Image (tube, rainbow, N blue to C red):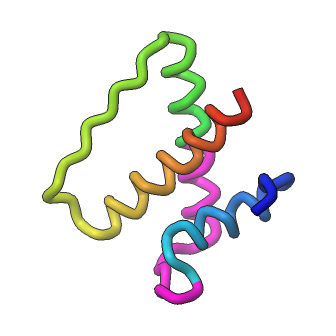
Amino acid sequence: MAQPSSRDEFTDYCLRRLGAPVLEINVDVDQVDDLIDDAIQFFQEKIQNSLQTFKVLTDLSVTMKSEILLKFMVIEFMVQLY
């Protein structure tokens, strides 16, 4: 797949990585936009501080795991661009 070139394409890419359309992803487009913004801000803060420490807890709810996965996908994409 080619790299997403717009925010809408990136949102679709993230949802596909989460399993859509095979799995029903129960998030609103505004929530996805918020998570992308949060992940970009997180990436910018961590890259400035040269800190990239991630702790994954196994007892998170499915929704939290999806949110974390979405943030990591955004970060992974940003690292590829960086």
The N terminus - image quarter: bottom right
Number of numbered labels in the structure image:
0
Judging depth in this view, the residue of 47 and 28 nearest the camera is 47
Judging depth in this view, the residue of 79 and 11 nearest the camera is 79
Which residues, given as a range, are shown in magenta? 21-38
Looking at the picture, how far across and down is residue 12, in whole percent?
A: 69, 69
The verdict on residue 26 being magenta is yes
**At x 49% / y 79%, what residue is drawn?**
25
Judging depth in this view, the residue of 38 and 2 nearest the camera is 2
The verdict on residue 37 being magenta is yes
Q: Is residue 81 left or right of residue 37?
A: right
Q: Is residue 60 left or right of residue 25?
A: left
**At x 54% / y 52%, what residue is drawn?**
35
**At x 34% / y 26%, what residue is drawn?**
53
Tell me: residue 73, above or below residue 9.
above
Tell me: residue 69, above or below residue 26.
above
Tell me: residue 7, above or below residue 79.
below
Judging depth in this view, the residue of 27 and 81 nearest the camera is 81
Considering every residue shown, the one lying at the far left of the view is 59
Looking at the picture, how far across and down is residue 62, in whole percent?
A: 29, 69
Considering every residue shown, the one lying at the far front of the view is 1
**At x 34% / y 67%, what residue is drawn?**
63
The C terminus - image quarter: top right
Q: Which of the 4 image quadrants contains residue 2?
A: bottom right
Q: Which of the 4 image quadrants contains residue 8?
A: bottom right
Considering every residue shown, the one lying at the far right of the view is 5
Q: Is residue 79 left or right of residue 63?
A: right
